[in-house]
Image (cartoon, rainbow, N blue to C red):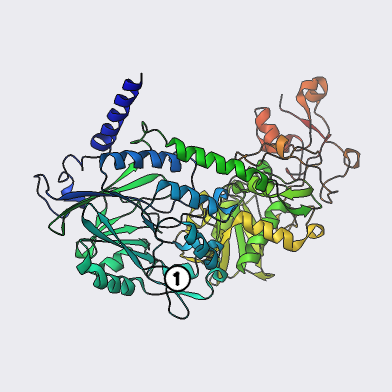
Amino acid sequence: MNSWKKLSSILTTAALLFGCLGTAAADPATNAGTAGTGTTTTPVSGKHITILHTNDTHAHVVANDKEMGFAKLAGIIDQYRAANPNTLLLDDGDTVHGTTFATLVNGESIVKVINKLRYDAMVPGNHEFNYGWKHLVELSKEILFPVLSANIKQTDGTRLFQPYTIKEVDGVKIGIIGLTTPETAYKTNPKNVEGIQFTDPASEAKAAVDEIRSKVDVVVALGHLGQDASSKDTSLKVVKEVPGIDIFIDGHSHTVLEKGLIGDNGTLIASAGEYTKYLGVVDLWVDGGKVVQKQAKLIDSTQAADVQPNAEIAALISSIQKDQEPILKEVVAQTSVNLEGAREKVRAGETNLGDLLTDAMRDVSGADVALTNGGGIRASIKAGTVTKGDIITVLPFGNQIVTLKVKGSDLQAALENGIAAYPEPSGGFPQVSGISFKIDTSAAKGSRVHSILIGGKALDPEATYTLATNDFTAVGGDQYTMFAKYPQAGMFGSLDEALIRYMQKAGSTSLQAQADSRIQEAKADGKAIVPATQTVPSAPAATPAPQQEKPQSDSTAAVKPAPAKSAPAKPKTAKPQQASAAAQAANSHVYVVKSGDTLYAISRKHGTTWQQLQQLNKLKNPHRIYPGQKLDLPA
């Protein structure tokens, strides 16, 4: 049995390296026409060195769909190291922040994992500064390999990190230079970088290349710069302005370069996407102190399907998660009211939790307007003690708050997009702060939003407003495509962190029992105004488990509220709709509303539509139904 296991492992390694993952080790000239420096088809002489690289993993340590996770990456890395001892492992930044696995302990958990993976060097990206630059310096002292950046300096001109390192691999000297995007100055909270500055990457790279070129055989730039058209300092700009860089490992823009990209001065640029979806591989051959061949490729979850995760890394991640369980139970705030976050509430109307979250976004960013998609809110919060786990259950995705400078006309287009399905639930329904508007459901889609006020004044389509949103909608998620053209003006940490701080700042007694009518349903002529809000249901329910990341059903999210003004306090205070003759004749054609019900949910359960139920029961507002109310169902 042991012999068979050993043979199986050897065959898997061979398949990984020579089969689906490319032919570099067997015939390095095969891909020369796409990402190599030559076109010869004959075998290349010289020493073969492999550089494995990751970027923009954002603490996605656990496997999830196409995200391989760090244990799987480690399994692939193990096989490459076994096949070629001349292998380096580099990380291009945005590593220690992004999910609660990291943020619960300010990045210390990620340091443990990457130390175990035995990286050879890394560069800090902008998100490494999300805990503040002084904390990053402290983290770097715990990292067992060099943290590099040539262009981060304190106000006195001294560098925060060493600019480069030189690694000797089988007699080949490789110089690795770190470069960090100057956008960090505003793509983390500005308070996180007070007292430091980000100098010109091209100038610093040129100085470093001039210093080490004569001392090394290979120059690698490890640059968290990216290739976004909106960015001033990019990898493309650096390789154009700085001769002498053989390989540029890129990050920041989450670019996927399947076979690399040959830039100016013959530099091979490689980038491995995001979130552990890929492991980057650069193969190069060095002969006589010169790089004679180089090529790049990516490994994804499909290609590595048969690779077993590294058991030691998997155990470490599990152990850290177990250690974090007490942190999830940590009390972070109190609330005197129930905060409504049930799936079919936040996706079909304004809720008090949506108001609170967007208020927190606007508070931390100083923006004119805040907007987040209702689909990103995943649970309710019961009145009483609020734990960190409760907040993470509400906001499990680690989304970051970003600001954009947006024209008023695009804000209006965004609102039209968000309420296009209203009153049916939609993940894109906008929860907002700093802005109010009305919806005319009788108008054509695309022309339903009116009476938009920002700061109490009518929206100016030609004016520019600062919008705080999340990094999902900012790039066009939930069809907010009008935002995608705008570069980020600032970054302000994660949604869960902002919500915790704001709840602590606001205090329990200031929280609203109901949404405050920022969104109303009204015809454009001003008649029949009703709040487009979702009232808090009246029946209590258990708080979801902290690790829950799936949409919550109405039954699990319903909680006991404070008395609501916009709905009857007791069933007897409002008259049920008159039952139809058919319903009177057959009890099965009458439905009694339960706590947490919505007209949409009832319609789905009984094979009809909410519009039919509204018409049959002569409901003026389809959102205003209450426990004990009898509704006629179509025969």
Return the x and y of residue 197 as percentages of the image width and height: 46, 75
Looking at the image, the residue that sits furthest to the top is: 1
Q: Quadrant of the N terminus?
A: top left
Q: Quadrant of residue 9?
A: top left
The residue under the point 29% across, 25% down is: 7
Q: Is residue 335 left or right of residue 231?
A: right
Return the x and y of residue 15 as percentages of the image width and height: 27, 32
Taking the image as drawn, is residue 275 in sight? no
Crowding around mark 1 (Cα neighbors within 10 Å: few <14, some 14 to 19, many 20+) is many
Residue 608 in the image: above or below residue 171: above
Residue type at the position of mark 1: Leu
Q: Secondary structure at mark 1?
A: loop
Q: Which residue is mark 1?
A: 160
Q: Quadrant of residue 547?
A: top right
Q: Quadrant of residue 153?
A: bottom left
Return the x and y of residue 481 as percentages of the image width and height: 48, 55
Please tell me how many numbered marks the rendered image carries. Answer: 1
The residue under the point 66% across, 57% down is: 499
Residue 60 in the image: above or below residue 631: below
The residue under the point 74% across, 49% down is: 386
Return the x and y of residue 580 as percentages of the image width and height: 80, 28
Q: Is residue 209 left or right of residue 285?
A: right
Looking at the image, the residue that sits furthest to the right is: 572
- Of 68 and 435, nearer the camera is 68
Taking the image as drawn, is residue 180 in sight? yes
Residue 338 in the image: above or below residue 220: above
Q: Quadrant of the C terminus?
A: top right
